[in-house]
Image (cartoon, grey):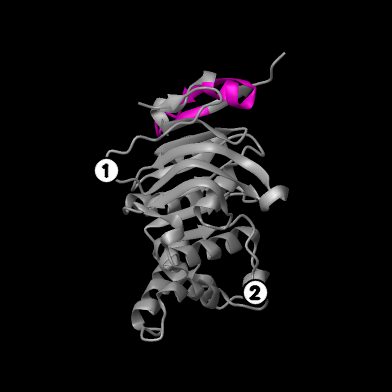
């Protein structure tokens, strides 16, 4: 059963014994020691393997902080995160990069790099002293570019591309990394609706192929359309979590976002669409 209630934590029930990502009593934020700014407060949630879990909530509620802490880009102040049943801090750097890939909101593009070379950097975790670049790496890069729809841009300088094209190139890098867990931090920001749908279609394909995808999204109707599971956050806590059809109600949206709304079903997808109304 889903859980949703004010100022309390929630868990996504996993049908398997082991969650892909398990978060327990997590406190995290920015900075260290006395100067630390706590953003997440005693967060508990399980992410089921093979799901497309979308984290939603108002601005500054801790969505990206939670995702970055899962990716080990921010420190855990207290509590624990387990990845496939092992503590996050037990993973070596390359081992974690073979297990989990992360697409940040605004990745910095190296100057003058071309598309194919940037996508190829996704193969770095698979390289080593013994294992050098191989035909398998070439095939992974090619497949990633095709799946992300950027194979026709392979020789172009990334910085000269449009925002939507650049975002798909970075998504191709993540695809080339070939990890079982994929984290996407606001992957549709600054994109028009066509490119938003293209990026989320690729993410959905990853989930349907068996990968666990976790994304932060602002647009609720897109979250409702693509997610299998939702994590709804408010003020640094998990307000609700569960399968989309079990969690989403007008009352939940109203309480989290302080807005009145109706939910109607999309006749094509049977997924809820949000129709907000100003209060007053």
Q: CA distance from mark 2 to mark 1?
A: 42 Å
Q: Quadrant of residue 6?
A: top right
Horizontal side, residue 24 vs residue 50: left or right: right
Which residue is under mark 2?
110
Q: Where is residue 111 shown, x and y percent of the image?
A: 68, 76
Q: Is residue 270 magenta?
A: yes
In the picture as drawn, the residue positioned furthest to the front comes out as: 34
Q: Is residue 123 visible?
A: yes
Let me know if residue 115 is in the magenta part: no
Q: Point out the stretch of residues depicted in magenta.
A: 252-273
Q: Quadrant of the C terminus?
A: top right
- The residue lying toward the viewer, choosing from 247 and 280, is 247
Residue tagged 1: 17
Q: Is residue 127 above or below residue 55?
A: below
Between 34 and 201, the one nearer to me in the picture: 34
Q: Quadrant of residue 245?
A: top left
Pick the front one: 233 or 182: 233
Q: Quadrant of the N terminus?
A: top left
Does 75 appear above or below 38?
below
Front residue (pair 95, 59):
95
Q: Can residue 195 be seen at all in this image of the molecule?
A: no
Task: Give the residue drawn at x 40%, y 79%.
Answer: 138
Nearer-N-terminus badge (2/1): 1
């Amino acid at each position: 059963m889903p859980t949703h209630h004010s100022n309390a934590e929630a868990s996504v029930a996993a049908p398997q014994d082991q969650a892909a990502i398990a978060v327990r009593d997590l406190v995290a934020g920015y900075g260290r020691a006395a100067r630390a700014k706590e953003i997440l407060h005693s967060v508990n949630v399980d992410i089921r393997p093979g799901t497309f879990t979308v984290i939603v909530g108002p601005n500054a509620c801790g969505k990206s902080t939670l995702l970055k802490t899962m990716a080990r880009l921010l420190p855990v102040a207290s509590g624990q995160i387990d990845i496939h049943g092992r503590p996050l801090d037990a993973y070596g750097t390359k081992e974690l990069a073979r297990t989990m890939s992360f697409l940040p909101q605004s990745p910095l593009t190296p100057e003058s790099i071309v598309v194919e070379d940037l996508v190829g950097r996704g193969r770095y975790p698979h390289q080593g002293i013994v294992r050098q670049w191989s035909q398998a790496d070439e095939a992974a890069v090619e497949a990633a570019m095709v799946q992300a729809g950027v194979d026709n841009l392979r020789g172009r300088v990334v910085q000269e591309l449009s925002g939507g094209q650049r975002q798909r190139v970075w998504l191709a890098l993540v695809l080339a990394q070939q990890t079982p867990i994929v984290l996407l931090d606001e992957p549709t920001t600054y994109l028009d609706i066509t490119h938003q749908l293209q990026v989320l279609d690729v993410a959905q394909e990853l989930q349907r192929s068996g990968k666990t995808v976790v994304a932060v999204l602002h647009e609720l109707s897109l979250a409702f359309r693509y997610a299998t599971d939702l994590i709804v956050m408010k003020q640094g806590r998990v307000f609700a979590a569960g399968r989309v059809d079990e969690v989403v109600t007008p009352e939940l949206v109203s309480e989290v976002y302080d807005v009145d709304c109706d939910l109607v079903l999309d006749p094509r997808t049977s997924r809820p669409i949000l129709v907000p109304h100003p209060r007053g």
